[in-house]
Image (tube, grey):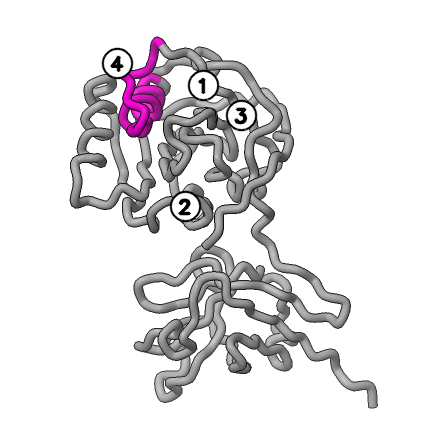
């Protein structure tokens, strides 16, 4: 999946948020190396009482968009004041900025490469600070591991009660990914795409289920890889006898293409970025 980015101004607001001692971790580090353990060790050396929650460390390497989606799907499950440490950082050591953001009553620490874009799109107010106070960084500072040496100590220090402004000044030009939503075509189609395939083979699209009413689902269909899907279900096991593909509103808040006890992705030979068309047939006037 390409990681196209663009500059887009943030909305500047004073957002009073009470910091908690909860820190979530989301990375592409995997678990075979020492990386995740080192990040946790630095956090706990600064705040031994911190509660650390692993969202995932299996984001595909350098895939900023996948990280942005996973963060969007998970951050609302956390209590207000949670600090989300998200590191998928192909630009580590370069001129890309480290940032600290406030949005939705929570905090976000990571690289300025668009990783928080979908959270910003989802929240009416957000604030972004450029982290410049190097006294909070771990020394010596590695140019290849800012997750350990920059972001972990900042997140830990923040969890100890330091104000966000202690780490730097506000900016209005944080890097943003293109918006996640689908395209609305003149012919009435909604042109979406597959943005995630989970371990069960469910294909998550970027199409908002609220575009469909109960009446719409009686005449709507999804088209992907030349396959037309006309079945819309409320839950996975709704029609136990039917092994065909169907659409469902998934837990991340998007339409998913699924199959009972089978991988929809394998059935479709589908992959990230594949186009998914939502077609809503208008009723015929008689």
Labels 2 and 3 touching (C-beta < 8 A): no
Mark 1 sits on what residue? 131
**Marks 3 and 1 in Cβ contact (< 8 Å):** no
**Spatial separation of the CA atoms under disc 3 and disc 1:** 9 Å
| Residues at marks 2 and 3, CA–CA distance in whole angstroms | 18 Å
Give the main secondary structure of the magenta stretch: helix
The residue that appears at 51% across and 77% down in the rendered structure is 225
User: Residue 153 lies in what quarter of the image?
Assistant: top left
Quadrant into which the N terminus falls = bottom left
Picture layout, residue 162 above or below residue 69: above
Q: Are marks 4 and 2 in contact (CB under 8 Å)?
A: no
| Residue 139 circle label | 4
Question: Residue at horizontal 32%, vertical 77%?
Answer: 262
Query: Measured from the top left, where is residue 149 in percent x and y?
Result: 29, 22
Left or right: where does residue 36 sit relative to residue 245?
A: left
On residue 128, which mark appears?
A: 3
Badge 4 local density, few (<14 within 10 Å), some, or many (20+)?
A: few
Q: Dividing the image into 4 quarters, which one contains the C terminus?
A: bottom right
Q: Nearer the viewer, residue 128 or 284?
A: 128
In the displayed structure, would residue 202 be above or below residue 8?
below
Outermost residue on the bottom side: it is: 286
Q: CA distance from mark 4 to mark 1?
A: 16 Å
**Is 263 situated left or right of 42 in this image?**
right
In-front residue for pair 150/126: 150
Expressed as whole percent of the image width and height from the top left, the position of residue 231 reads 51, 80
Q: Is residue 100 at least partly visible in the picture?
A: no
Q: Position of residue 5 (x, y in %)?
A: 55, 41
Mark 1 and 2 residues: CB-CB less than 8 Å, in contact? no
N-term mark: 4 or 3: 3
From the viewer's perspective, is the residue at label 4 or at label 3 nearer? 4
């Amino acid at each position: 999946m390409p990681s196209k980015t663009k500059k887009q101004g943030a909305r500047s607001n004073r957002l009073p948020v009470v910091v908690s001692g909860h820190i979530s971790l989301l990375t592409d580090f995997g678990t075979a190396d020492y990386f995740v353990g080192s990040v946790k060790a630095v956090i706990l050396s600064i705040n031994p009482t911190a509660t650390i929650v692993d969202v995932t460390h299996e984001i595909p390497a350098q895939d900023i968009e996948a990280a942005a989606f996973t963060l969007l799907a998970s951050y609302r499950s956390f209590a207000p004041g949670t600090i989300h440490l998200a590191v998928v950082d192909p630009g580590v050591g370069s001129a890309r900025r480290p940032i600290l953001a406030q949005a939705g009553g929570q905090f976000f620490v990571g690289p300025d490469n668009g990783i928080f874009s979908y959270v910003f799109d989802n929240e009416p107010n957000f604030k972004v600070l450029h982290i410049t106070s190097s006294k909070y960084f771990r020394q010596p500072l590695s140019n290849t591991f800012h997750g350990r040496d920059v972001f972990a100590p900042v997140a830990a220090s923040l969890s100890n009660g330091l104000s966000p402004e202690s780490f730097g000044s506000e900016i209005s030009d944080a890097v943003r990914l293109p918006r996640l939503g689908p395209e609305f075509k003149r012919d009435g189609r909604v042109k979406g795409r597959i943005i995630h395939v989970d371990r069960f083979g469910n294909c998550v699209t970027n199409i908002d289920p609220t575009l469909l009413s109960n009446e719409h689902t009686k005449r709507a269909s999804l088209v992907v890889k030349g396959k037309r899907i006309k079945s819309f279900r409320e839950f996975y096991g709704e029609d136990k006898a039917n092994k065909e593909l169907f659409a469902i509103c998934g837990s991340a808040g998007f339409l998913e293409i699924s199959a009972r006890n089978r991988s929809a992705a394998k059935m479709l030979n589908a992959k990230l970025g594949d186009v998914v068309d939502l077609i809503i047939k208008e009723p015929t006037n008689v």
